[in-house]
Amino acid sequence: TGMPGDLTELGRSIRSKVHRCTGIPVGVGIAPTKTLAKLANHTAKRLQAHTGGV
């Protein structure tokens, strides 16, 4: 992916910080292309109970 570390943990960290700073719940999708990231984000939101929104 070109990104070091655990991407799931990065996504959780982003979600947590956005929620803490703005109070707005968000979903995070990380992928090698914009299209796949949008699809991952959509899936994370739909399956939030299983994925935690990441």
Image (cartoon, rainbow, N blue to C red):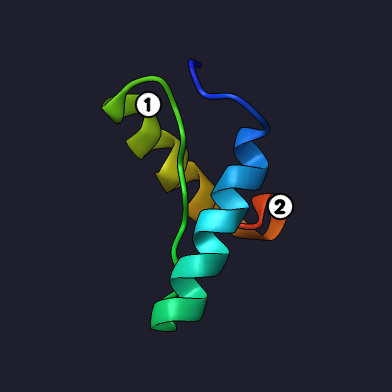
Seen in the picture, residue 34 relative to 29 is either above or below; the reply is above
The residue sitting at the top extreme is 2
User: Which residue of the protein is positioned furthest toward the right in this rendering?
Assistant: 50
Q: Earlier in the sequence, mark 2 or mark 1?
A: 1
Q: Tag on residue 50?
A: 2
Name the foreground residue: 43 vs 28. Answer: 28
Q: Where is 47 relative to 36, above or below?
A: below
Q: Inspect the image, locate mark 2, and give the three-letter code of the amino acid beneath it.
A: His
Q: Secondary structure at mark 2?
A: helix
Q: Residue furthest left?
A: 34
Residue located 50% across and 16% down the image: 1
49, 18: nearer the viewer: 18
Report the side of 39 relative to 7 (left or right). left
Q: Residue at x 48, y 16 (%)?
A: 2
Which residue is rendered at x = 40% and y = 20% of the image? 32
Based on the displayed image, in which of its 4 quarters is residue 53 positioned? bottom right
Q: Confirm or deny contact between disc 2 and disc 1 (CB under 8 A).
A: no
Whole-percent x, y for residue 51 in the image: 66, 50
Q: Where residue 34 sits in the image (x, y, percent)? A: 28, 29
Q: Is residue 25 visible?
A: yes
- Report x, y in % for residue 10: 58, 45
According to the picture, the residue beneath numbered tag 1 turns out to be 36
Asked if residue 54 shows in the view, the reply is no
Mark pair 2, 1: CA separation: 19 Å
Which residue type does callout 1 highlight?
Leu
Q: In this rendered view, identify the residue nearer to me: 27 or 3.
A: 3
- 44 above or below 33? below
Q: Which mark is residue 3?
A: none
